[in-house]
Image (cartoon, rainbow, N blue to C red):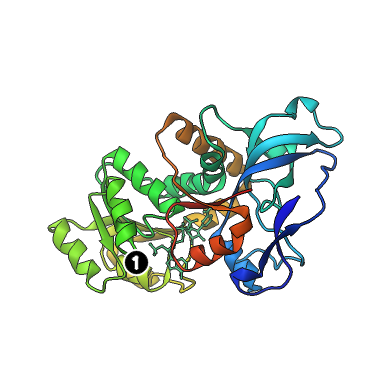
């Protein structure tokens, strides 16, 4: 089979498209002929060899990244019901090996792809969508909220914007550059702003006409989060899902208390309750199947995995990045 293989930590071009042996499913596993594989921002950091408390352990090389795939079961291992053969499935349970034409996953991690959902949509929802479900549970948005979403054109961001709009909340989507701002506007955000423009906070404040942000949902961290936080009302909630900028941002606890604000990590909530994950996955897939959340993907051929990494880490993607073998 073909796969995108990393032999040495470093830049995106180190991902090399090559022929490798087919994987064989072990006990309790199936083999999946991959139709779509998800790419994560965190995998771009892992590719460089970066080691930190917030990253998964540095992989052993050579490595094939990719833990979430959608495709068709083409072989089953020992102790697996052969009825799985030929089923269209999606999983977040591949430990790695998803950037490939074939991969293996534990049978207990599989979901059947709901009718009508494309492999690209299914693979978007099984992790990015599931993460969004946790993010939204923690944020507990209501129709009276004024919600500010960072990286609003991203994989998670655009799902948050859609959810908040459906609730009837007032939605401000912030993203980098005119194309992303247009995408956020198309999603129905009440206000779409380019936060690469230095005066963006003034624009938001002026256009909200005296109303203040009551919920800030952030996956970017760093200076962008710090600037967005300045727009948060007394009593407002800051909810974070990640730190895409690698810049780090933590509101001052004293200021939080003084202003009656809260700061919560949905990422911590997600990581500390792995038993909740299957439920989030089911809800996310169902939301896409019934059309209440519409995932958007930016697809690259598997042979161009290096381009996908380069685009993601340089903020040139909208929606979820997937690889198509
Ligand atoms: N997807 C998941 O399942 C998942 C799970 C756990 C945590 N997270 C975290 O949630 C956040 C959003 O994830 P996502 O998958 O939806 O990603 P994404 O928003 O599709 O992509 C990342 C976006 O972050 C913004 N960004 C700002 N500074 C950046 C930088 N220095 N490098 C790269 N991107 C930068 C860019 O949007 P702008 O150009 O608009 O600024 C970029 O497009 C990330 O922090 C991620 O680590 C995601």
Instruction: Please provide percent x and percent y for residue 135.
Output: 45, 50
The residue that disc 1 covers is 256
Q: Is residue 8 left or right of residue 27?
A: left
Disc 1 crowd rating (10 Å Cα; few below 14, some 14-19, many 20+) is some
Q: Is residue 221 left or right of residue 235?
A: right
Position above or below: 212 against 140: below
Q: In this view of the protein, which residue sits in the foreground, 214 or 87? A: 87
Residue 84, located in which quarter of the rendered image? top right
Q: Is residue 18 left or right of residue 305?
A: right
Residue 236, located in which quarter of the rendered image? bottom left
Q: In this view of the protein, which residue sits in the foreground, 244 or 238? A: 244
Task: Give the secondary structure at mark 1.
Answer: helix
Q: Is residue 49 left or right of residue 285?
A: right
Position above or below: 83 against 325: above
Residue at the top extreme of this rendering: 83
Instruction: Please provide percent x and percent y for residue 42.
Output: 57, 63
Please report the residue visible at 37 percent of the width from the left and 74 percent of the height from the top: 223
Please report the residue visible at 80 percent of the width from the left and 27 percent of the height from the top: 82
Can residue 55 be seen here? The reply is yes
Instruction: Please provide percent x and percent y for residue 138.
Output: 44, 49
Residue at the right extreme of this rendering: 78
Q: In this view of the protein, which residue sits in the foreground, 268 or 90? A: 90
The mark total stands at: 1
Q: In this view of the protein, which residue sits in the foreground, 219 or 48? A: 48
Can residue 51 be seen here? The reply is no
Instruction: Please provide percent x and percent y for residue 48.
Output: 63, 73
Q: Does the numbered disc 1 mark a residue whose Cβ is under 8 Å from ligand 1?
A: no
């Amino acid at each position: 089979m073909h796969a995108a293989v990393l032999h040495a930590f470093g830049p995106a071009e180190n991902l090399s498209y090559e022929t490798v042996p087919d994987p064989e499913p072990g006990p309790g596993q199936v083999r999946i002929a991959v139709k779509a594989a998800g790419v994560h921002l965190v995998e771009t950091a892992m590719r460089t060899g970066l080691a930190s408390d917030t990253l998964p352990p540095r992989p052993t090389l050579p490595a094939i990244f990719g833990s979430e795939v959608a495709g068709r079961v083409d072989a089953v291992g020992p102790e697996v019901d052969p009825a799985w053969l030929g089923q269209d499935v999606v999983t977040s349970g591949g430990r790695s090996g998803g950037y490939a034409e074939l991969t293996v996953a534990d049978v207990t991690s599989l979901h059947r792809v709901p009718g009508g959902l494309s492999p690209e949509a299914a693979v978007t929802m099984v992790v990015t969508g599931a993460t969004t479900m946790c993010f939204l549970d923690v944020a507990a948005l209501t129709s009276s909220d004024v919600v500010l979403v960072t990286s609003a054109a991203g994989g998670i961001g655009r799902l948050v914007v859609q959810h908040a709009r459906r609730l009837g909340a007032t939605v401000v989507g912030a993203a980098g550059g005119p194309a992303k701002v247009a995408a956020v506007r198309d999603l129905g955000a009440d206000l779409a702003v380019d936060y690469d423009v230095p005066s963006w906070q003034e624009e938001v404040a002026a256009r909200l006409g005296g109303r203040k942000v009551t919920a800030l949902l952030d996956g970017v961290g760093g200076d962008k989060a710090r600037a967005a936080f300045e727009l948060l009302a007394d009593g407002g909630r800051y909810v974070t899902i990640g730190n895409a900028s690698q810049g780090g941002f933590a509101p001052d606890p004293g200021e939080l208390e003084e202003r009656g604000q809260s700061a919560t990590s949905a990422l911590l909530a997600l990581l500390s309750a792995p038993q909740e994950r299957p439920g989030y996955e089911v809800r996310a897939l169902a939301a896409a199947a019934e059309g209440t959340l519409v995932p958007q993907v930016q697809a690259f051929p598997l042979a161009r995995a290096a381009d996908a990494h380069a685009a993601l880490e340089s903020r040139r993607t909208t929606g979820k990045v997937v690889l198509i073998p």
